[in-house]
Each structure stands twice: as structure tokens, then as C-alpha cells.
Image: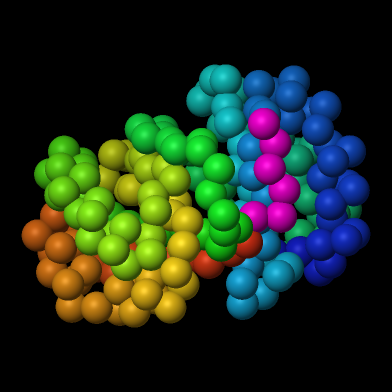
Amino acid sequence: MHKVTSYSKWKPLYDAHDTARVSAGLHDYVIGRGVQDSNMLTIALKADDTAKAKAFSKDPGLKQAMQKGGVIGAPVIALITMVYQDTSNISTSLRASSMLTVKDWDTWEKSFKDGEQDRKDNGIVVRAYGYDASDNHKVRVVSALIDSAKAMAYYKSEAIKKRMADAGVVGQPSRFYYHIVQRYY
């Protein structure tokens, strides 16, 4: 995730750097643009090998390519082990990427699965979830917001606060709302 000065300037340079990504075992998956700031981007890649992905993230060539593409500030790079992924077609491009810290992965996952119907009733469909490749206490959930008004209200509700507390979530989750602008399959 990072901010760019101009998406239209960044995108062709990102595309031109594809050979370096592929040689590092990284494959384009999704590009999303922020709802509040369309120059804030999230880029999801699939990795063949975690060690190669980590090495690529520290490669000086990546830093140079990002600077050339107009990336502002330091990017946030996370390697997530996805445990669940739904690749079916969904009618909306609006997504929420939620990052949270949990006391125990297994406790959190059980509670999260138990909350599926509550999320659906509130316009939220989980697309993927998993944990940081080096720390299963750092969780990432990507959801499609089918009914954004209901979803936003639910994210602020006492019901979800209680569910998260019971699941062992520590502190407040951070959420990034974005629209998918490119999918690669």
C-alpha cells in the first residue's frame, strides 16, 4: 500500500516493472484505489516463495522504480498467508481491507467464522482473510461491501465491538476502503 502523486503516471511504470516482479515469483492480482484518496493504492500480489518476496521488497531496484513512478513516502509492505479466499464474481468493486491484532489466531478464526451471517446481514461479504507470514497475531480481512451504508453502520456498531472483544481482538482495527480498478487472473 502506498500513495502516488498521479495514478495515470504511476500505472504505466508499474506495468513496466512486471518482469522484475515475475522473476521474483510475484504475480499481479488486484490493484485498488482509495475511496477517500484515489492516489492511495493497494496492490495485491500472489507470491510463489515468501523468502523471494521478502528479498524483492528490499531490492534497491524496487525502491528506484517506486520513486520513478511517483510513490510518496514509505510503502507498507505486508506478506500475508491467506487462509481463505473467495474468487467468485461479486457485483461491487468496493472493498474494505481490515488490519487487526488478535490474542490467539484459532480463537479469533472460530469467532470470525461464527459471525458470517451477521456480516452478510450487514452487507459485508468476506473475500479473503489470513495472517502476517511471520506473526499469526496480525490478521488481514478483505471484504466486499455489498451495501455500503449497512456495512459502515455495522463497522461502528456495538455488536461488532462486542464480537471483536469476544474474539480477542486487541485495540481498534484499521480499515482501508478502496475500489478495485484492475484484476489479474
Q: In terms of depth relative to the viewer, which is nearer, 138 or 54?
A: 138
20 w.r.t. 182: above or below: above
Residue 132 pos. (x, y %): 39, 40
At 38% from the left and 70% from the top, the residue drawn is 151
Q: In terms of depth relative to the viewer, which is nearer, 3 or 82?
A: 82
In magenta stretch: residue 181: yes
Q: Can you say which quadrant of the picture contains the N terminus?
A: bottom right
Q: How many marks?
A: 0
At 52% from the left and 59% from the top, the residue drawn is 95
Magenta portion: prevailing SS class? strand
Residue 77 seen in this snapshot: yes
Residue 9 pos. (x, y %): 90, 59
158 w.r.t. 172: above or below: below
Q: Can you say which quadrant of the picture contains the C terminus?
A: top right
Q: Viewed as shown, does residue 123 lie left or right of 111?
A: right
Q: Viewed as shown, does residue 67 lie left or right of 110?
A: right
How was this image coloured? rainbow
39 w.r.t. 89: above or below: below
3 w.r.t. 53: above or below: below
Q: Which contiguous range is marked in magenta?
A: 180-185
Q: Viewed as shown, does residue 49 lie left or right of 83?
A: right
Residue 113 pos. (x, y %): 21, 45
Residue 42 pos. (x, y %): 62, 54
Residue 133 seen in this snapshot: no
Residue 67 quadrant: bottom right
At 9% from the left and 60% from the top, the residue drawn is 166
In magenta stretch: residue 135: no
Q: In terms of depth relative to the viewer, which is nearer, 89 or 110?
A: 89
